[in-house]
Every structure is written in structure tokens, then in C-alpha cells.
Image (cartoon, helix red, strand yellow):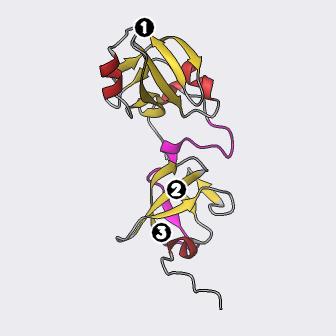
């Protein structure tokens, strides 16, 4: 799936204000968290500059950023959850077997054979590991599948497709039988 150089890619999120001096808490989504600052300034989804870091220091699971243009505590708190973007062409090309999340969204999903069973709706991470959310065709309830080599053995960006090893197992909503 070829992405235009002007596309924006999510690299972090605003967690809210830090104190009352205009600093903001930012969580990095980059593989190396501090590499986030190599891609600044951070933009909104519309391409508007939100944060140009003057300084940043690490905290427990985020960074405390002193921006060049400070905002009031209430403004930062109102922006909590706002995703931070950078232009796609500012990022390095991924290594072999590495992917940007944006490259996976929209890919056709196959469970073997030539007939697609759905599309990747989203890539999620709730702390343990990445999950791909598959929207089955023609309609149906989305299915979450661990994004592991065992469960998703093939990612082919040139053919715009992925293969899920055991889709039926993950799509099965039946309750397991009780042990006798």
C-alpha cells in the first residue's frame, strides 16, 4: 500500500498538562521512545503545528515537554488524547519485517486461498501486544487477532494483503464447553 509523502503518521499523543508553567505530557508511539523528538514539530490531523518542543525530559511512561509556544494548563488538559502526527516523508523507511501501523490499515485479509475475508480496520495496542482488528466481509462483528508471526504469518504490502493463520478460531464466539 503506497502512501504519499504528504500523508501524516501518528507518532504520539498528548496526555495533558504538567504543572502550571505551560509544559505538556506526551506519550511516544515510536519504537525507540526518545526518537519521537527527531521528527518534531508535531502536527494535528489537519497538519496544524501543535507542539514544537524546546526541551523534553523523560518521566515514568511519557515525556514532559516544554514547548516553544506555551499554552495554559486548561488548554493542554482539553487536548488530552489528541494524537500527534508528523509527515510520512520525515520518517525512515521501515526495516524488513517492520511496518508502520498506517501501512496495515485497509489491507485485505485472507485466511488462505484467494478470497478475501475482510479488511484491517485498525491496529490496537492495549498494553500487552499489538492486535489487528479485522472487519469481515460483507458485514459482521469485528474480530481481534494478535499481531504475531504465528497468527499473521504473511504481510505483503506490495500485494496489499495479509494472511491470518486461524481466522475461524479468533472469529468463534461460542462458549467453550465445561470440563466434565
Determine the image quadrant of residue 45: top left
Q: Which mark is residue 132?
A: 2
Q: Which residue is mark 1?
A: 68
Helix, strand or loop under label 1: loop
Specify whether residue 166 is in view.
Answer: yes
Other residues around mark 1 within 10 Å, as few (<14) / some (14–19) / many (≥20): few
* Of the image marks 3 and 2, the number of the one nearer the N terminus: 3
Q: Which mark is residue 116?
A: 3
Specify whether residue 159 is in view.
Answer: no
Helix, strand or loop under label 3: strand
Residue 111 forms part of the magenta stretch: yes
Other residues around mark 3 within 10 Å, as few (<14) / some (14–19) / many (≥20): some
| Range shown magenta | 94-117
* Of the image marks 1 and 2, the number of the one nearer the N terminus: 1
Tell me the quarter of the image containing the C terminus: bottom right
Q: CA distance from mark 3 to mark 1?
A: 48 Å
- Residue at point 37% right, 10% down? 70
Amino acid at each position: 500500500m503506497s502512501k504519499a509523502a504528504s500523508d501524516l503518521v501518528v507518532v504520539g499523543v498528548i496526555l495533558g498538562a504538567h504543572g502550571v508553567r505551560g509544559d505538556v505530557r506526551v506519550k511516544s508511539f515510536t519504537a525507540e521512545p526518545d526518537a519521537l523528538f527527531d521528527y518534531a514539530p508535531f502536527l494535528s490531523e489537519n497538519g496544524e503545528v501543535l507542539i514544537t518542543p524546546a526541551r523534553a525530559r523523560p518521566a515514568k511512561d511519557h515525556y514532559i515537554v516544554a514547548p516553544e509556544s506555551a499554552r495554559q494548563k486548561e488548554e493542554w488538559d482539553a487536548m488530552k488524547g489528541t494524537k500527534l502526527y508528523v509527515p510520512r516523508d520525515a520518517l525512515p523507511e521501515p526495516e524488513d519485517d517492520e511496518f508502520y501501523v498506517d501501512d496495515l490499515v485497509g489491507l485485505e485479509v485472507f485466511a488462505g486461498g484467494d478470497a478475501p475475508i475482510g479488511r484491517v480496520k485498525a491496529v490496537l495496542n492495549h498494553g500487552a501486544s499489538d492486535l489487528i482488528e479485522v472487519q469481515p466481509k460483507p458485514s459482521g462483528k469485528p474480530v481481534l487477532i494478535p499481531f504475531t508471526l504465528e497468527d499473521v504469518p504473511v504481510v505483503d504490502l506490495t500485494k496489499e494483503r495479509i494472511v491470518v493463520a486461524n481466522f475461524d478460531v479468533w472469529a468463534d464466539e461460542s462458549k467453550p464447553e465445561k470440563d466434565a
